[in-house]
Image (spheres, rainbow, N blue to C red):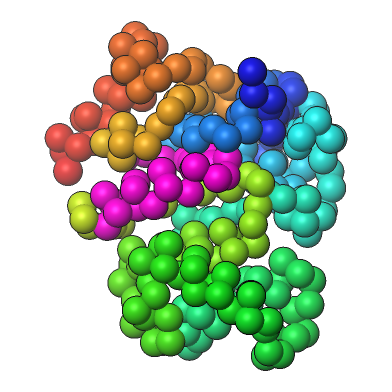
Amino acid sequence: MRNAIIRTEDVTVEFDGFRALNSLNFSVDEGELRVVIGPNGAGKTTLLDVICGQVKPLGGRVLFKDQDITGLPEYRISGMGIGRKFQTPSVFDNLTPYQNMELSWHQNKRVFQSLFASVSSSTHEQILGVLEHVGLAEKAYQPAGALSHGEKQWLEIGMVIVQDPDLLLIDEPVAGMTDDETEKTAQLLLSIAQDQTILVIEHDMDFVKQIAQKVTVLHEGALLCEGTVAEVQRNPQVVQIYLGRERQANAQG
């Protein structure tokens, strides 16, 4: 039986009277690739914000490897082994993918001032290895600004991987991607999941089907249901609250 690497206990978050998370109890096991879905306003991104320390809960607590991290500053939580990739890529366009990776590696080692210092040969090989893993080895020394949207997403995933987190949080990784880029992203996350625990927030159900081992559905800041993709899709509440809206939106689009 695997242990929970992250869990929330009765976590509540409010913004100006709006309850974004409502006594949420949620957990992800070590070695799992979990996908969280739900309608807009369900609390998905807020969940990541609370785990990372970006948002402080009104009540409840967050435990990482059974250690209470509630209220800790973001840098301490990151240093404990939680890495996050945001929805919008935040790479430095004027730097190369290699330099972006080097910057991310230095930040993890808390020596930001030594950005332009030389790295060891082992670190150099590690960075090149991650670039190979995310499919950017051939563009390692080209300006990152010339990368496609999908390639920038892969670069930022690599920038988190190089920090060697125990838990990787990814927010809507395939938003704006082509079908081919989406397929490559699915294969990338599945390969990463062989070594790291991953929690993904996503709307694209076709993509969810490709990667999810287990799906959590949030609604109005609380856990609605959990299960396999098939189980979730058969749940009457999920169909009514979420999947029906998604199908209607796709039909209108």
Which residue is at 84% across, 35% downward? 67
Whole-percent x, y for residue 133 in the image: 43, 62
Look at the image and tell me whether residue 93 can be seen: no
For the N terminus, the image quarter is: top right
Q: Establish if 99 lies above or below 176.
A: below
Look at the image and tell me whether residue 65 can be seen: yes
The quadrant where residue 164 appears: bottom right
Q: Which residues are magenta?
A: 181-205
Which residue is at 78% across, 50% downward? 80
The mark total stands at 0
State the residue in front, 5 or 56. 5
Q: Establish if 44 lies above or below 101.
A: above
Q: Please, which residue is most extreme toward the top here?
A: 236
Is 195 contained in the magenta span? yes
Q: Establish if 176 lies above or below 240.
A: below
Which residue is at 31% across, 24% downward? 243
Which residue is at 42% across, 47% downward? 191
Whole-percent x, y for residue 225 in the image: 49, 15
State the residue in front, 151 or 102. 102
Whole-percent x, y for residue 128 in the image: 49, 74
Q: Quick check: 79 left or right of 163?
A: right
For the C terminus, the image quarter is: top left
Is 40 contained in the magenta span? no
Whole-percent x, y for residue 146 in the image: 34, 82
The quadrant where residue 16 appears: top right
